Amino acid sequence: MGELFWIILFGVCIWVPLIWNKIAIGKRIADEEKKAGRDLTGEITPFTGGRM
């Protein structure tokens, strides 16, 4: 029982920040595209969500 708790806790500590990061970057890219009024594929860095 104790081992299962630590496995679940470790999984949550790994996956929650990764998912949060992807959502945040997606939101930033969407905001940049809305501000520019066009698709910025190829002009935005996928790691930061900012323009190159």
Image (cartoon, helix red, strand yellow):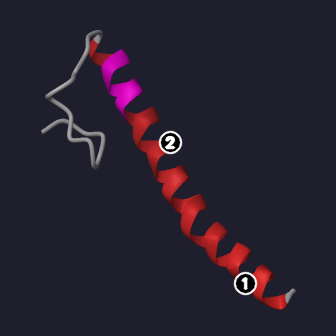
Q: At which x and y percent is residue 11?
A: 63, 70
Residue pictured at 83% horizontal, 90% vertical: 2
Which mark, by number, is residue 32? Answer: none
Q: Which residue is mark 1?
A: 6
Magenta stretch: dominant secondary structure: helix
- The residue carrying pointer 1 sits among few (fewer than 14), some (14 to 19) or many (20 or more) residues within 10 Å by Cα, namely few
Residue pictured at 29% horizontal, 47% vertical: 48
Queried whether the magenta region covers residue 42, the answer comes back as no
Q: In the rendered view, would you say 6 is above or below 48?
A: below
Q: At which x and y percent is residue 26?
A: 42, 35
Q: Residue furthest bottom?
A: 2
Quarter holding the N terminus? bottom right
Q: Residue furthest top?
A: 37
Dividing the picture into quadrants, the one containing residue 6 is bottom right
- Amino acid type, callout 1: Trp
Residue pictured at 37% horizontal, 16% vertical: 34
Comparing labels 2 and 1, the label whose residue is closer to the camera:
1
Q: Secondary structure at mark 2?
A: helix
Bounds of the magenta span? 29-34
Left or right: where does residue 27 sit relative to residue 4? left
Q: Which residue is mark 2?
A: 23
Nearer to the camera, 16 or 4: 4
> Nearer the N terminus, badge 2 or badge 1?
1
Quarter holding the C terminus? top left
Q: Secondary structure at mark 1?
A: helix
Nearer to the camera, 7 or 45: 7
- The residue carrying pointer 2 sits among few (fewer than 14), some (14 to 19) or many (20 or more) residues within 10 Å by Cα, namely few
Q: In the rendered view, would you say 12 is above or below 41?
A: below
- Amino acid type, callout 2: Ile
